[in-house]
Image (spheres, helix red, strand yellow):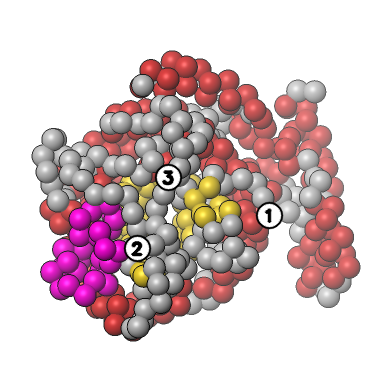
Amino acid sequence: MSIEKSHFLARERYAQLGVNVDRALKTLAQIPVSLHCWQGDDVGGFENFGGTLGGGLVATGNHPGKARTPDELRADLEQAYALIPGKHRLNLHAFYGEFGGQKVDRDEIEPKHFANWIGWAKKNGLGLDYNPTCFSHPNAADGFTLAHANKDIRKFWIEHCRRSREIGAAMGKALGKTCVTNVWIPDGMKDTPADRNAPRARLAESLDAIFQRPISPKLNLDAVEPKLFGIGSESYVAGSHEFYLGYAVSRKKLLTLDAGHYHPTESIADKISSVMQYLPEILLHVSRGVRWDSDHVVILNDDLLAIAREIVANGYADRVHIGLDYFDASINRVAAWTIGTRNMLRALLIALLEPPAIKAAEAQGDFTTRLAMQEEAKTLPFGAVWDYYCESRGVPAGENWLTEMKNYETKVLSKRG
């Protein structure tokens, strides 16, 4: 059966349940997902001085074809975008700037170091997001940055984050698309600390210094990202969920909810509607935790479906910025982008196709019908709608994208050595 015919039959089935498929697809096309540049090169960046990855970050695997230069990384991203329906964004870390062979330290970076990225994004119709890079640097070697006891080290990272906001604003201005600049730091301790308060007090002071200068929200939005633990900071993280929730609410910043930054039994889906009672906008880093390790490629599992449904069912699409955050070097890195982003979009589509009878039954106190309809919805023909959406957007439907990916691997990735 052809994709078009399958879609026609699926539309009829959804229409019987009061679902407007055309409206769902139109809405989906307006929701951008921000791909993360660091999947393409195992969080390596393009600086010219050393510093181990650290900060609880580990990229495992050695699949051939890792991007070695900004041009290679951009080429890989273009291949991924060509296999993902819709227009999306790119999330850059500070150490992916292009420094012309010069040693430019983190407290010296400027918008000019990202001119090529901005020009490339404009050419491809993409928005850019940004992150200061508070790891892989000698000043982060002992696991502390903005909460460091050494004032000079704190000053260094404060200046780095200040400049990152300016770069984010320059990106937003140049592209006419607001940049979200997200601050995440690895600060924490491997074993039980004697003083949990002092680092958090220093962190709040450092953040206030970073955000002191107002920047138009039309150009740049500031976000802060909590974490439960990291490798090397298992017992204590200064920037905990409670710390950053209080900070975001009191300072009017975006809170970043990362799906891999909580206990394995916790889902960020339930947190979305809670924090949205007090915050106008939030940022999501959609990832997949496996046991105590996060940052696996996003799959279409219950956690992802729940996240997407919270966004759609509550009308949060304009208030929630969706980004991905994982790094897997054990498989084709470009395919990892493609798989994860297509799954994020698939989950959003399933949420957009939810029969209205489910919420209506709950409003009427009919929890039997609610449960029955929730289960029936799981076998509705969303796959036929997804394939049609991909084809209508000029990207391969179903597993056909793998053929293009294998060709790219043979012609490009395998030649990198």
Where does residue 290 sit, x and y in percent of width and height?
A: 58, 53
Report the residue that reaches farthest toward the left: 102
Residue under pointer 2: 186
* Label 1 packing within 10 angstroms: few (<14), some (14-19), many (20+): few
Label whose residue precedes the other's in the sequence (3 or 1) = 3
Disc 2 to disc 1, how far (Cα)?
A: 28 Å
Where does residue 293 sit, x and y in percent of width and height?
A: 52, 55
Closest to the observer, 157 or 234: 234
What residue is shown at x 84% (from left), y 52% (from top)?
A: 376
Apparent side of residue 167 relative to residue 55 in the rendered image (left or right):
left
What residue is shown at x 40% (from left), y 72% (from top)?
A: 191
Residue 238 in the image: above or below residue 403: below
What residue is shown at x 72% (from left), y 38% (from top)?
A: 383
Residue under pointer 3: 59
Question: Mark 2 or 1, which is nearer the eye?
Answer: 2
Give the image quarter of residue 209: bottom left
- Residue 220 disc label: none
Q: Which residues are magenta?
A: 133-158
Residue under pointer 1: 302
Residue 145 shown in magenta? yes
What residue is shown at x 32% (from left), y 78% (from top)?
A: 200
**The C terminus appears in which quarter of the rendering?**
top left
Disc 3 to disc 1, how far (Cα)?
A: 25 Å
Report the residue that reaches farthest toward the front: 191
Residue 312 showing in the rendered view: no
